[in-house]
């Protein structure tokens, strides 16, 4: 029984530090876009603001999953989906920035 619980929470142990790091990357991109003046600042600013919220939510839910006894799996699934959404948004933003720089 304890092995099953440990296997279920393994994803949360990876989501928590990864989402915290990506949260910081979103802040760096947001700051970078404020310093450099490109044509798409407002779109990228809004995308990074949503990314910050998504990664913050993923961090909170993955921490809740690690700490929870009863609803840990539910928190972990939610954290996983939110994390993947934020990661997808960050990838789309990176493509937009790359095409804007070129």
Image: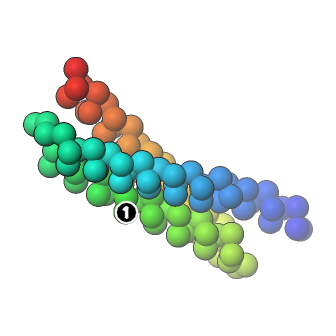
Instruction: Using residue 14 as the reference point, say whether residue 43 is left or right of it.
Output: left
Label 1 crowd bin: few (<14), some (14–19), many (20+), radius 10 Å: some
| Residue at left offset 88%, top offset 67% | 2
Q: Is residue 15 above or below residue 36?
A: below
State the quadrant of the C terminus: top left
Instruction: Using residue 7 as the reference point, say whether residue 74 is left or right of it.
Output: left
Query: x, y percentage for residue 78?
Result: 53, 63
State the quadrant of the N terminus: bottom right
Q: Quadrant of residue 61?
A: bottom right
Disc 1 secondary structure class: helix
| Residue at left offset 51%, top offset 52% | 21
In the displayed orientation, state which residue is furthest to the top.
102
Name the residue beneath numbered marker 1: 53
| Residue at left offset 26%, top offset 33% | 97
Res 81 seen here: no
Query: x, y percentage for residue 44?
Result: 23, 45
Instruction: Using residue 98 as the reference point, say whether residue 85 is left or right of it.
Output: right
Q: Quadrant of residue 64?
A: bottom right
Colour scheme: rainbow
Q: Is residue 85 above or below residue 36?
A: below
| Residue at left offset 34%, top offset 35% | 94
Query: x, y percentage for residue 41?
Result: 16, 44
Instruction: Using residue 89 as the reference point, say whether residue 100 is left or right of it.
Output: left
- Counting every numbered tag in the picture gives 1
- Foreground residue, 75 or 43? 43
Query: x, y percentage for residue 18?
Result: 56, 51
Q: Quadrant of residue 51?
A: bottom left
In the displayed orientation, state which residue is furthest to the front.
35
Q: Is residue 30 above or below residue 57?
A: above
């Amino acid at each position: 029984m304890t092995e099953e619980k440990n296997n279920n929470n393994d994803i949360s142990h990876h989501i928590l530090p990864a989402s915290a790091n990506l949260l910081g990357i979103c802040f760096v991109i947001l700051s970078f876009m404020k310093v450099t003046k490109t044509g798409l600042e407002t779109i990228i600013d809004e995308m990074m603001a949503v990314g910050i919220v998504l990664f913050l939510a993923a961090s909170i839910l993955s921490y809740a999953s690690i700490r929870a006894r009863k609803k840990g799996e539910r928190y972990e699934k939610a954290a996983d989906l939110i994390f993947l959404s934020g990661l997808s948004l960050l990838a789309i933003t990176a493509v937009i920035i790359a095409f804007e720089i070129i």
